[in-house]
Image (cartoon, coloured by chain):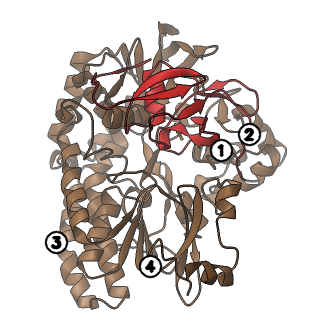
Amino acid sequence: MSSNRELGDPYELVVVGAGPAGLAAATAAAGLGINTVLLDEQSSLGGQIYRAIEETPLADPAVLGKSYGRGRLLVRSFVASGARHIPGASVWHVAEGQGGCLTVGLSVGSAAHMIEARRVILATGALERPFPIPGWTLPGVLAAGGAQTLLKSAAIVPAGYVVLAGTGPLLWLFAAQMLRAGGRITAFLDTASVENRRAALAHLPGFLASSYFREGLDLMRAVRRGAQVVRGVKALVAHGTERLSEVAFRRLGSTEERIPADILLLHQGVVPDLNLAAAAGCKLTWDERQLAFLPVTDRWGASSVEGIAIAGDGAGIMGSEAAAERGRLAALDAACRLGRITQSDRDRKAAPVAKALARATRGRAFLDALFRPTRAFRVPEGETIVCRCEEVTARQVRESAAFGCPGPNQLKAFLRAGMGPCQGRMCGLTVSALLAEARGVTMGEIGYFRLRPPVKPLTLSELAALPATPAAMEAVGR
Amino acid sequence: MFRRTVESTAATISLVVDGNEVRARAGESLAAALLAEGLLSFRRSAVSGVPRGPWCLMGACFECLVTIDGARQRACMIRAVDGMHIETGEGRRRLLP
Ligand code: FES
């Protein structure tokens, strides 16, 4: 086995992603004596949900709410755990290596490296679901989660005429956070269908018993007090030439309304960031409740690929509290499979974790139903851009289907959709939805882009820094 | 537009953006620094050359690519460091694959 002195490999366990799942997994694993490293693309711990938790410049971090503060304990436990942390590490490859090991390809600074590990836990978290409306590529139109990152990490709020549009807990949370931080919201355009409420009612008991209930109600009330909320929005267009200047929208049974806008923040839920898992060969399945592809995992997070487990929102959206518990379960299973604890030890230690997980996932079905994004905003029409990188439109995707393009992978050859630097992160779900509709098949049948490593673009100089052969890796490792 | 909620002079550094001096807070991302300066468009798109700016602020979309000290990088993934030279506006990317 090659070794990489600088990065300290080989490791027994590599954890990818320093959000709640990755932090909890690495902490638990190190606590069981496993030689563990945590890799994360950001320079500080916490992931997106607890972004800048130990260093936020906000005058009063309390504007971010109670749940943000929970990240501090996770980060501090991790720091005390003895696991290694490599910040600024962008992981672009995980695959079977030699002797039952896994090989992990990563870039740190401007150099690429390969490290070896017995097991890998992917805790890559979530991405915001694509929100393809006309004009969504204009400067001034951003993902609401992106604006939230600016608030947490740089104490910056959108200013001028600010319009929020979409659906999902994060959008409401961010609206409340930005109001508390002194921001102003010109309009909050709620795109959830009014039908959602009826569907959600079936899941009400679970929600009433959940921690989201009080917090969620307070939040929505605060947003309604501080902003003009327009319900039942059916259509949205961002207008402008060099940048956003206006937002046009239509509600049920009314004509188009237009409002001036400097910033438009879009959001319609989050979906697993599954590029790394998919490129590693983990099997995916379509989940109709979450309207997303999820990696197939068992109760421990084990994927269909030996040695790779997936924990947290990357294996299906359940939220940050559940993510930490799922990280702990994956770590216990890793310890068992590494021979560090027996199966009965694992099961005994897992019992309270599973209980906490069940508690943390209460109310999720209600939220999924209430904030379910409508078809109109998932399956765009006409000249709306689907693939931002290659500027491919909905019409072009439909035409390709009419010309006989059978699925997302073949579409790459037709239109290059999904082949730009974001590697389908901004268009994958939209492309699958358009093709499935056009061909009259289900999302499960049409599938997702087949992903290949590297899952992040590499520069030539990064590649040049990579030892070319196992022998060369031996040579530089000594 | 974006605005800072905290005006601190403590950690102030200076960057050179398209030849102009820009003040920033040490440690924040370059994307945050440029947005706080009022810049929304960071580059031109690779295909049609229309203006584009940051979308995700978490390294996923690659919309925030700028040239930082000569290398094409995601502005949201790089921390502002005193004296950095940033060029915005380039359309063609030099990335693999
Ligand atoms: S804004 Fe998306 S990668 Fe920087």
Q: Residues within 10 Å of mark 3 (few under 14, many from 20)?
A: few
Question: Residue placed farthest to the front in the image?
Answer: B83
Quarter holding the C terminus of chain A? bottom right
Alpha carbons under labels 4 and 2: distance apart: 39 Å
Counting residues from the start of the chain, the first of labels 2 and 1 encountered is 2
- The answer to whether marks 1 and 4 mark residues whose Cβ atoms lie closer than 8 Å is no
Q: Amino acid at mark 4?
A: Arg
> Which residue is tagged 4?
A119
Q: Are marks 1 and 3 on the same chain?
A: yes
Q: CA distance from mark 3 to mark 4?
A: 24 Å
Name the residue that disc number 2 marks.
A397
Q: Which residue is mark 1?
A: A431
Q: Which residue is pictured at 69% across the width and 23% down the height?
A: B50
Q: Is mark 3 within 8 Å of ligand 1?
A: no
Estimate the spatial distance between the alpha carbons at disc 1 and disc 3, rounded to whole Å.
Answer: 41 Å
* Colour brown belongs to chain: A
Q: What amino acid is at disc 2? A: Val
